[in-house]
Amino acid sequence: MTQPQTPPRRTVLAGGGALLALGAAACKPKEAAGGPGEKSAVPLLAAATDAYVYGYPLVTMDTTRRVMTNVAAAEASHAPMGQFANMRTYPTAAFRDVTAPNADTLYSSAWLDVSREPVVLQIPDEHGRYFLMPMLDGWTNVFQSPGKRTTGTGPQTYLISGPTWSGTPPAGVTQYKSPTDMVWILGRTYASGTPQDYAEVHKIQDQLKLVPLSAWGQAYTPPAAVVDTSVDMKTPPRTQVESMSGQAFFQRMAELMKTNPPAAADAPMVARLAKIGIVPGQAFDATKLDAATADQAKAAALKQITDHMPKAGKDVNGWTFASPTGQYGTDYLQRAFIAQAGLGANLPQDAIYPTAKVDANNQALDASINNYVIRFPKDGLPPVDGFWSITMYDPSYFFVANPQNRFTVSARDKLKQNPDGTTDVYVQAKSPGADKASNWLPAPSGPFILMARTYWPKQAMIDGGYALPGVAVAGSANV
């Protein structure tokens, strides 16, 4: 995403199987210290830790929604509920709305509440341009993904309904049923970054329309929005979520589950939630979970989420390939990790995001110590039907400011090849020289993270037949 001082989102790795006892991974339940019938705090802590991991994406989504929709009128990355916020340029290094923003597409983001009635989405003719309009439910699962890959680039109209709506869509309108009343449309339209191409994308964005079903076919003006002054518009949503006390988190989680129900496959977790006072459709019963245990569970869960990266997917040459992304089933730790590191991740068929924190020798990436090079073999650039890029982030997954204002190297750059047909991408803090500047990805003078984006990846990218080259040390940064 891309927006001024607000939420984190979109992007990354994968791994693990269905984890219904996440808390136990950090705190293996022990026998109660007291006599028979005395309640043990350890199993309660384990259940609360599981619950925090399970609910982290839902609370993060809602906090992000609150920030991004708390405006009187649409402006850049923010818009009231039911309206599109259209980014007109790539994000800057000051952008904090979502983690792992990209500098390849222009975002068109909208948050919907389909509890009262469905909303109709109209997409104009994209004239062959790459676009993607994924729809996420409140738990961060992508439940539909119209776009060039799946539905082509001609005009399209969709009715987005909630889980309980049972009406009939208008003729010629395709119904997409959301599992939750909260829906996030996180549209992306490819742009080359030139003023001329920006203008063409703006024409497309201006034709995107959202209309409540009751106003379909009529002139429609969105209702006036009211700004809630109690909403923190400066602190990134992820920070807001992780700053909540444990009990405040569970209270918010229980409230959100009233309109964003758990999936049928979550039944074992739902039973586990009841032990700490969370029952779908009901308010949080804080008498079942004391504040100290709730805070311990929060700390244990956040550690699990943050530490999950090495297990978040397959590691190839120092790059972690997330799997799954977009749809997670009962892999709650994976889902929470993706929500923390890159809220809004796509299905792998739409995009894969290999991420590197280490070099090819498994040493942490740090441009204050080393210069690096990524050498692609001849005819060995990432295989995609859409486009690819490699983006530079700081350790918190935000852009790194640099005098060149360059955050990526990508397929649209005029990358120079070596005489043997290989292509080098130079990753370092200082310029590699004028003759190599076209292939330079500026790094901070310190730790950093790289993320490759491969939109509409070919099968070799999806199944692992293609391997990204490792980030190799190319000498000392102090020479």
Image (spheres, rainbow, N blue to C red):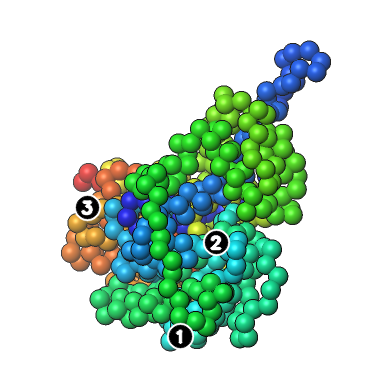
Which residue, given by chain and number where applicable, does mark 3 sit on?
430
Which residue, given by chain and number where applicable, does mark 2 sit on?
113
**What amino acid type should be assigned to the residue bearing mark 2?**
Asp
Provide the secondary structure element on which disc 2 rests: strand
**What amino acid type should be assigned to the residue bearing mark 1?**
Asp
Quadrant placement of the N terminus: bottom left
Residue 333, percent from left and from top: 60, 45
Identify the image quadrant of residue 348.
bottom right
The residue closer to the viewer here, 343 or 347, is: 343
What residue is drawn where x is 28% and y is 48%? Answer: 444
Q: Which mark is residue 125?
A: 1
Q: Earlier in the sequence, mark 1 or mark 2?
A: 2
Residue 115, percent from left and from top: 60, 61
Q: Is residue 69 above or below residue 269?
A: below
Say if residue 355 shows up in the picture: no
**Could you tell me how many numbered marks the image carries?**
3
**CA separation, marks 1 and 2?**
26 Å
Identify the image quadrant of residue 128.
bottom left
Q: Residues within 10 Å of mark 3 (few under 14, many from 20)?
A: some
Q: Which mark is residue 392?
A: none
Q: Earlier in the sequence, mark 1 or mark 3?
A: 1
Q: Is residue 11 above or below residue 448?
A: below
